[in-house]
Image: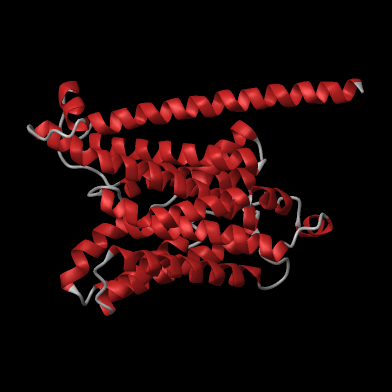
Amino acid sequence: MISQLKNNIHERKDSRLKLVSITSLFFILGLLCILSIGLGTRDVAWQEIIGALNGQVNTVGEAAVTMRIPRTVLAVIAGAALGLSGTVMQGVTRNPLADPGILGVNIGAAFFVVVGLAWFGMEQLSSYVWMAIAGSAITAVFVYTIGSMGRGGATPLKLALAGAATSAALSCFTIAVVLPRNDIAGGARSWQIGGVGGATFDSIFLVLPFLVAGLFISVVSARKLNSLALGDEIATGLGENVAWARGLSGLGAILLCGATTAVCGPIGFVGLVVPHFCRLLVGVDHRWLLPFSAISGASLLLLADVVGRLIARPSELAVGVVTAFIGAPFFIWIVRRQRVREL
């Protein structure tokens, strides 16, 4: 009785600590939103920010802020989606190296979009979304199938190698498709770097239903991911349909990744860095890990976008380049520290 009471007290303290942490993350995200609107290649005054938020575009500064608002919104949404998809992928594969970029899912989505653009004359963003989701799904299934072959099934090392090989192959295929087409080469190459510049509310509203669906599926899958973390045999013993749990969770990650890639291009490493950071804060319970990953992913991508605007004035670095500078050393550190063990 006393031990149960102590456990209840400990759980309450732990929940309070998590609530304080998630509130702090929301505060940081709000601060980053303000910085994203106010900072960039051109400095603006507070009066211009307030005027732009009220719909005024009478000065150059107000016009600049008006363009930064949808960019900020897209960075928040895309970062949250990538953070969530990375967490789900790591939970589904029990692989600490899982990430939409490392497993080749982003590159698969980008390849399908480029093929649609070059061979089928796609011009509407809605077509990009469907092609990106199809590319994400096919690539994810292919990589998981290749990584599952041989002894031991889908180990973290085999999945990482299969994803790296698939990414390299699809990158070469993408270049081969783009090279003969000078009319689309510039735009396609710029889009492949990954960024949130040029965002509009029209493009955001177009991909929003797919992102909401992916978010809903991922949140619903939280308990299933907790069961999968125990291992397939234990999960089955607890009454979980392992194949269904993996398929449903993977669908949520694919929707999030595909829709984000369609509107932003392939942005790497956010889905790798964020889940590991959040596990340090809240542990491995996906009921807490998923919302923390969404907020942290939004904050990371927004911070990367602001940094990219400031360090290369009067030009700017695409957010995909900044996240690569952050994520590549982190990837090496995980490999050395974890030695690619399962989660």
| Quadrant placement of the N terminus | top right
Which residue occupies 50% across, 68% down? 137
Which residue occupies 48% across, 59% down? 255
Which residue occupies 54% across, 72% down? 142
Above or below 270: residue 142: below
Front-most of residues 8 and 281: 8
Where residue 214 appears, as percent x and y from the top left, is 50, 55
Q: How many marks?
A: 0
Q: Would residue 311 be visible to someone looking at this image? A: no
Where residue 293 appears, as percent x and y from the top left, is 52, 41
Judge from the rendering whether residue 113 lies leftward or rightward of residue 332; answer left or right. Answer: left
Where residue 198 appears, as percent x and y from the top left, is 22, 49
Above or below 247: residue 324: above
Q: Quadrant of residue 233?
A: bottom right
Q: Would residue 139 be visible to someone looking at this image? A: yes
Above or below 46: residue 260: below
Where residue 170 appears, as percent x and y from the top left, is 41, 70
Front-most of residues 220 and 226: 220
Judge from the rendering whether residue 85 lies leftward or rightward of residue 238; answer left or right. Answer: left
